Image (cartoon, coloured by chain):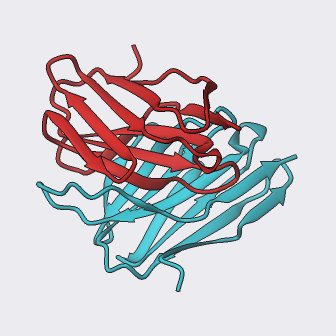
Chain colours: A red, B cyan
Amino acid sequence: QKEVEQNSGPLSVPEGAIASLNCTYSDRGSQSFFWYRQYSGKSPELIMFIYSNGDKEDGRFTAQLNKASQYVSLLIRDSQPSDSATYLCAVRTGGGNKLTFGTGTQLKVEL
Amino acid sequence: DTAVSQTPKYLVTQMGNDKSIKCEQNLGHDTMYWYKQDSKKFLKIMFSYNNKELIINETVPNRFSPKSPDKAHLNLHINSLELGDSAVYFCASSLLTVTSNYGYTFGSGTRLTVV
């Protein structure tokens, strides 16, 4: 079992819709959870982090964490074509600030 | 000013050669990392240094040798390059604290192609 799992996609949503990206992790001791966005040919860019159960909202983005189910998700409201990218879920475990990444979900927002 | 800068951006070299990639950060972070991203976009940690001390050393061939002369710089030297080393190598930095919820700041990456 992979430590951090994501559906590779592509996930296609129409412009203006809500995109829902999911991630599961295997280590129950995981402490912090991050979402990165990576455009093709570019470096990953941090867009959200969450460490408490529940929801965290930042603009059009909402991160949701359920530690009991070992599940973290990212919702993107009012999706725009500029949101088309690969979204990487990352999980921090241990004390060394090591981030373990999932393989990413490719999101396509269509006009 | 670029926060985490890597050089070179592209590197094309022949099998068996030795090459180095350099990374510098001006964010005042105390921890730096090397990640390898394969063709399927999977990012895998290779090494991490905190204040010049190696703190993460994943299962990586010993042809790869990192060096950190100070907390703002991290280099990666690769000996006897192989075709399978072709990938994008990302440098990243962060603050290392037990309660840190900081993510990493990534450099722009070095695309290594071994022919």
Q: Nearer the viewer, residue A88 or B29?
A: A88
Residue B60 visible in image: no
Residue B25's quadrant in the figure?
bottom left
Residue at 34% x, 30% y is A73
Residue at 56% x, 35% y is B42
As drawn, the residue found furthest toward the bottom would be B1
Q: Nearer the viewer, residue A59 or B17?
A: A59
As drawn, the residue found furthest toward the top would be A1
Position of B108 relative to A101 (above/below): below
Residue B63 visible in image: yes
Residue at 51% x, 61% y is B91
Residue at 12% x, 55% y is B98
x and y, in percent, of residue B3 in the image: 47, 77
Q: Nearer the viewer, residue B34 or B106?
A: B106
x and y, in percent, of residue B113 in the image: 79, 50
Q: Is residue A79 left or right of residue B48?
A: right
Position of B5 relative to B76 (above/below): below
x and y, in percent, of residue B56 in the image: 33, 49
Position of B76 relative to A73 (above/below): below
